[in-house]
């Protein structure tokens, strides 16, 4: 491994080599001093450095912008099941800021109780969620038996897990509503587990940050996904479904009142929910 900065040529220190080694897409490593200079011009370097090449950084420092950049896709780690690796949507800087602001307002409206370590995951959501996709519930959660912290959220059409290590790409897994058979919850004093049962297999998440909030999240999603067989359906089941739809409609109403959703967006989401009754 080259132990000198790819930009200035200075010998790398142990600090430069920590936390992902300041590594670029083609394997070059830059020192923290060069990273600091470049990140002043482009803050995205601090969270997604691996996506940039040495030529990108040189172009940024010389011209104030990156002339051309290739997006690097990293395969999901073997110990994390690859349900569907969502492609990163291309957004302009202004559109990204607008969408991120909308998402943060949604989280405020939901009174989302998330740890400080989820900032990277939140910043990825504008690239992951559709323009009109609304977050209905969210919690800290990570795949069991991994070191990847992250978030688990649900929208009107799917559940999504996002994990984002420093200087590493976001790992995104989606679970479409039509593929989810049920969800379950295993209580634990330290880290309760949320399980998603699909047609193919079961996926398990640990919640270390706040076990009570994790259970609240499960109680919400269980009203959406846990249904009895048609042969055993009852009026009680319909009551649960109706209650879930009403809760989601109430949240959509608050998002509209807070100016996060337009009237057209609210009407569209409301129509989708009412079709479930």
Image: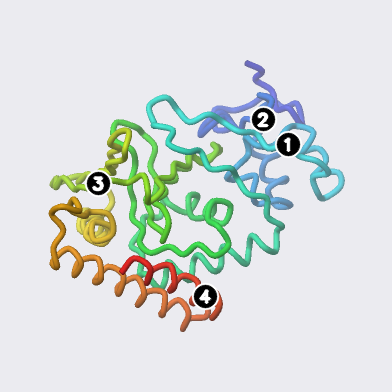
Q: Is residue 221 above or below residue 207?
A: below
Name, please, the residue furthest toward the bottom.
Answer: 257
Identify the residue position indicated by label 1 in the image: 70
Q: In the picture, residue 16 is in which quadrant?
A: top right
The answer to which of marks 4 and 3 sits earlier in the sequence is 3
The answer to which of marks 1 and 3 sits earlier in the sequence is 1
Label for residue 25? 2
| CA neighbours of label 1 inside 10 A, class few (<14), some (14 to 19), many (20+) | few
Identify the residue position indicated by label 4 in the image: 260
Q: CA distance from mark 4 to mark 3?
A: 29 Å
Q: Is residue 165 above or below residue 178?
A: above
Q: CA distance from mark 2 to mark 3?
A: 34 Å
The answer to which of marks 4 and 1 sits earlier in the sequence is 1
Q: CA distance from mark 2 to mark 1?
A: 9 Å
Identify the residue position indicated by label 3 in the image: 194
Q: CA distance from mark 4 to mark 2?
A: 36 Å
Which residue does the image show at 62% across and 16% down from the upper left? 1
Towards the viewer: 152 or 63: 152
């Amino acid at each position: 491994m080259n132990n000198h900065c790819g930009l200035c040529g200075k010998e790398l220190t142990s600090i430069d080599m920590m936390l992902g080694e300041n590594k670029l897409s083609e394997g070059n490593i830059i020192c923290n001093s060069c990273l600091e200079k470049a990140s002043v011009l482009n803050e995205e370097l601090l969270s997604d450095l691996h996506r940039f090449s040495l030529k990108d950084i040189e172009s940024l420092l010389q011209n104030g912008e990156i002339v051309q950049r290739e997006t690097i896709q990293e395969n999901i780690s073997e110990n994390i099941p690859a349900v569907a690796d969502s492609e990163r949507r291309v957004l302009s800087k202004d559109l990204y800021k607008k969408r991120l602001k909308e998402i943060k307002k949604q989280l405020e409206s939901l009174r989302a109780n998330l740890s400080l370590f989820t900032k990277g995951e939140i910043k990825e959501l504008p690239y992951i969620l559709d323009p009109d996709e609304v977050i209905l519930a969210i919690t800290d959660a990570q795949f069991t038996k991994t070191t990847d912290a992250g978030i688990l959220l649900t929208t009107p059409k799917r559940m999504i897990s996002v994990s984002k290590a420093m200087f590493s790409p976001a790992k995104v897994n989606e679970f479409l509503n039509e593929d989810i058979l049920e969800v379950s919850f295993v209580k634990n004093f330290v880290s309760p587990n949320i399980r998603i049962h699909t047609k193919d297999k079961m996926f398990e998440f640990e919640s270390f940050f706040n076990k009570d909030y994790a259970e609240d999240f499960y109680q919400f999603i269980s009203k959406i996904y846990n249904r009895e067989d048609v042969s055993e359906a009852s009026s009680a089941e319909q009551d649960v479904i109706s209650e879930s739809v009403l809760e989601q409609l109430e949240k959509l109403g608050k998002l509209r009142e807070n100016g996060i959703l337009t009237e057209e967006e609210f009407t569209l989401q409301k129509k989708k929910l009412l079709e479930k009754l």
